[in-house]
Amino acid sequence: MADTTTATRWTIDASHSTVEFAVRHMMISTVKGHFGKIEGFLEAPDIQDLSQGATLEARIDASTVDTREPQRDEHLRSAEFFDVANHPTIEFRSRRIEKTGDNRYKVTGDLTIRGVTKEVTWDLTYEGGGKDPWGQERAAFHAETKVNRKDFGLQWNMLLESGGVLVGDEVRVSVDVQLIKQAQNQG
C-alpha cells in the first residue's frame, strides 16, 4: 500500500484513454471491442518507479461496451454476459507492482467482473510523461492481460455444426491510459 503522505495522485483522463478487448469468434476470426468509459487513479511516490509503493484502481462502465454491432452489444449487456443491470462496473485494484525492466512492470491485483473477483496480472509499460500546453503534468501507461471469461461467470456459448464454439474463452485485454497529476494537499 502506498504511503499517502508522500504519494502523488494521478487520475485517469478518460478522453485520452482506451480499454479494448479481443476474443475469437467461430474459432476462425477475432472480434474486437472497447468500453467507452473508464475512471480511476494511480497513487505513487515516484511515477517513474511504480515498484516503490504505488497503487492503482480503475473502474469501467460495463454498459459502454461497443463492438460496432448493436445487437451483439445488447447481448453483451444482458444477464448472459456482463449483466450490467446488476453489475454496472468492471473494477481492478492492484495488490502489488513488481518492476521487470526499464519502464516495465507486472501489476497483480483483483479484477471484478459480474460480481466475481479473481487475481489477474497485467504487463504494464510506462510510456512517458510531460506537461501539456495548459501546464498540467501527464503520464501514460499501456497494460495488457489475458483472462478466461468463464472464470468470471460469462458462460454463454453456442456449439457450431462444424465443431467448436461461437465464442472463445480467452479474452485479450489492452488498456492505454493517460493520467493527470493532481495538486498536492497543502493541509
Image (cartoon, helix red, strand yellow):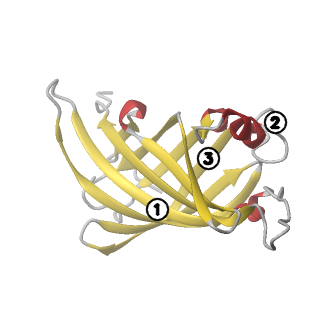
Label ID, residue 91: 3
**In this rendering, is residue 183 above or below 44?**
above
- What element does badge 2 sit on? loop
Q: Nearer the viewer, residue 10 or 102?
A: 102
Percent from the top left, x then y, of residue 140? 30, 48
Residue at coordinates 79% horizontally, 40% vertically from top-left? 83
Tag count? 3
The residue sitting at the top extreme is 134
Q: Is residue 96 left or right of residue 12?
A: right
Label located before the other in sequence (1 or 3):
3
Q: Residue 86 has which mark?
A: 2
Label 3 amino acid?
Glu
**1 or 2: mark nearer the eye:** 1
Residue drawn at point x = 34 percent, y = 47 percent: 7
The furthest residue to the front: 162
Name the residue type under label 1: Glu
Against 37, residue 53 (above or below) is below
Instruction: Determine which residue is flagged by label 1.
Output: 144
Seen from the viewer's position, the closer of residues 84 and 136 is 84
Quadrant where the C terminus is found in the figure:
top left
User: Residue 183, how many percent across, how many down?
Assistant: 28, 30
How far apart are the alpha carbons under marks 1 and 2? 27 Å
Between the C-alphas of marks 2 and 3, the distance is: 14 Å
Using the image, determine if residue 160 lies above or below residue 61: below
Quadrant in which residue 8 is drawn: top left
Mark 2 near mark 3, Cβ–Cβ under 8 Å? no
User: Is residue 168 or residue 183 the one in the foreground?
Assistant: 168
Q: Residues within 10 Å of mark 2 (few under 14, many from 20)?
A: few
What amino acid type is highlighted by mark number 2? Answer: Asn
* Residue displayed at 74% across by 35% down: 74
